[in-house]
Image (tube, rainbow, N blue to C red):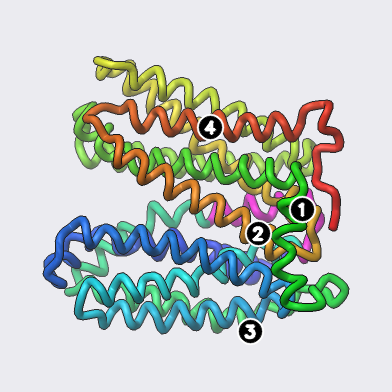
């Protein structure tokens, strides 16, 4: 069993992205005023972070397969800390955008390598259980971070939020240095840098691995469509207050935690493959409710209830899908666990960014664009999960390295 202190350290490392994105969201308008730029330009600090985070994961994954997990986490987190301080000192939006990319590039190490560490320490089912538990803890970050950011903003400046991120990163550096052993076994380390980066080809050559990556990434993208679209849909289309919107948003986080808890309890008996398949079916049913609630002219309370219930199912099911697809993928690639984790994370943030941009671009004053992207990605995820588990595809797991 993993030590409690190490578990919470891994959860903190996995939370770099939601904290670095959500903590300063209440300050975007203040940033625009302070740096004399437009709100749209300030919003780009979120987009560039997502891009930098994905690129960082692609670099750090293979590096951790060659050089070890602990060293890469420390290097990436140091970059994150210095970039966070630079963001706090930025005097123009151009500087802030540049430092946000560097910050994201450093933070990608913590997210991708923490999952590889779990793979190093546990077998497939136990890894799925631990990942579900880590996901339960990190799911609270999107709910807590904006409130913490609003509190910090009251202290006087949006710059203090980036100081807080630097302090968070520094705490993770100290914790990693003191608590994390090197988990990459000598026999699993790649022999050279070339071999480490060729791990991407090894992973992607397997159809089963590609299906697992698509299933996890597409579910994550559906959630990004929900995050992007619901502020307008709930507040403007359905006419809800900001407080009620926040309540509905929080309820989805609670559902995500609840599904993660069930996954951690059931995976030992049912196995990761079956739980991931159930999650895909549950999410697709929720997506259908969202699509029906978004029909033209439908803005009554029944449709609101249907959409809220649909998102509880669709978002919550990520607590089943994500840890179990990830555990299956990493279990099959012990020598390329970092590369496999990077591909999975890049698919999540890449498809998530595509969903977010698509919902914004196709905005037409209704809930239809959001519902369409939710359904498209959930159908894609369901196809990947069902293809992975159909009888003709046995055994459903990837072949090992």
State the CA–CA distance, disc 1 to disc 3.
24 Å
N-term-proximal mark, 4 vs 2? 2
Residue ID at (45%, 66%): 52
Question: Does the magenta portion include 356?
Answer: no
Q: Are marks 4 and 2 in contact (CB under 8 Å)?
A: no
Tag 1 residue: 126
Question: Does the magenta portion include 132?
Answer: yes
Q: Find residue 28 and report its horizontal and vertical position in percent.
A: 22, 61
State the CA–CA distance, disc 3 to disc 2.
24 Å
Query: Could you tell me which secondary element the residue under label 1 belongs to?
Result: helix
Q: Find residue 286 and report its horizontal and vertical position in percent.
A: 49, 26
| Quadrant including the C terminus | bottom right
Q: Is residue 247 visible?
A: no
Q: Are marks 1 and 4 in contact (CB under 8 Å)?
A: no
| Rendered view: 210 above or below 286 | below
Of badges 1 and 2, nearer the viewer stands 2
N-term-proximal mark, 1 vs 4? 1
Q: Which residues are magenta?
A: 120-137
| Rendered view: 340 above or below 89 | above
Of badges 1 and 4, nearer the viewer stands 4
State the CA–CA distance, disc 3 to disc 4.
41 Å
Tag 4 residue: 378
Residue ID at (74%, 63%): 199
Dividing the picture into quadrants, the one containing residue 80 is bottom left
Tag 2 residue: 341
Tag 3 residue: 178
How crowded pointer 2 is (Cα within 10 Å; few <14, some 14-19, many 20+) is rated as many
N-term-proximal mark, 1 vs 3? 1
Dividing the picture into quadrants, the one containing residue 111 is bottom right
Query: Could you tell me which secondary element the residue under label 4 belongs to?
Result: helix
């Amino acid at each position: 069993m993993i030590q409690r202190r190490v578990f919470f350290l891994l959860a903190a490392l996995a939370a770099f992205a939601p904290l670095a994105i959500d903590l300063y969201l209440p300050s975007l308008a203040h940033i625009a005023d302070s740096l004399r730029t437009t709100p749209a330009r300030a919003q780009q600090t979120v987009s560039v972070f997502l891009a930098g985070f994905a690129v960082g994961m692609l670099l750090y994954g293979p590096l951790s397969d060659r050089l070890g997990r602990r060293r890469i986490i420390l290097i990436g987190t140091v970059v994150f800390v210095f970039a966070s301080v630079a963001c706090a000192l930025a005097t123009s939006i151009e500087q802030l955008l540049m430092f946000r990319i560097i910050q994201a590039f450093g933070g990608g190490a913590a997210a991708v390598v923490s999952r590889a560490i779990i793979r190093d320490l546990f077998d497939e089912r136990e890894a799925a259980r631990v990942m579900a538990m880590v996901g339960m803890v990190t799911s609270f970050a999107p709910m807590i971070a904006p409130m913490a950011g609003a509190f910090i903003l009251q202290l006087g400046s949006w710059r203090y939020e980036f100081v807080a991120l630097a302090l968070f990163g520094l705490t993770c550096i100290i914790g990693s240095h003191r608590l994390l052993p090197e988990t990459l076994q000598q026999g699993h380390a790649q022999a050279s840098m070339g071999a480490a980066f060729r791990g991407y080809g090894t992973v992607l050559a397997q159809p089963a691995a590609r299906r697992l990556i698509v299933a996890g990434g597409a579910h994550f993208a559906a959630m990004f469509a929900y995050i992007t679209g619901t502020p307008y849909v709930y507040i403007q289309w359905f006419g809800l207050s900001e407080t009620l919107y926040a309540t509905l948003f929080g309820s989805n986080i609670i559902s995500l935690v609840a599904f993660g808890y069930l996954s951690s309890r059931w995976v030992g008996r049912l196995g990761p493959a079956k739980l991931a398949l159930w999650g895909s079916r549950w999410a697709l049913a929720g997506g259908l409710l969202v699509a029906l609630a978004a029909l033209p002219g439908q803005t009554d309370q029944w449709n609101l209830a249907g959409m809220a219930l649909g998102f509880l199912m669709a978002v919550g099911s990520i607590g089943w899908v994500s840890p179990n697809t990830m555990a299956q993928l990493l279990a099959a690639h012990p020598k390329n666990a970092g590369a496999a984790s990077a591909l999975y994370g890049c698919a999540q943030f890449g498809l998530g960014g595509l969903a977010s941009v698509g919902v914004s671009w196709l905005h037409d004053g209704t809930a239809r664009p959001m519902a369409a992207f939710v359904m498209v990605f959930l159908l894609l995820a369901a196809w990947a999960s069902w293809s992975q588990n159909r009888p003709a595809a046995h055994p459903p797991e990837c072949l090992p390295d």
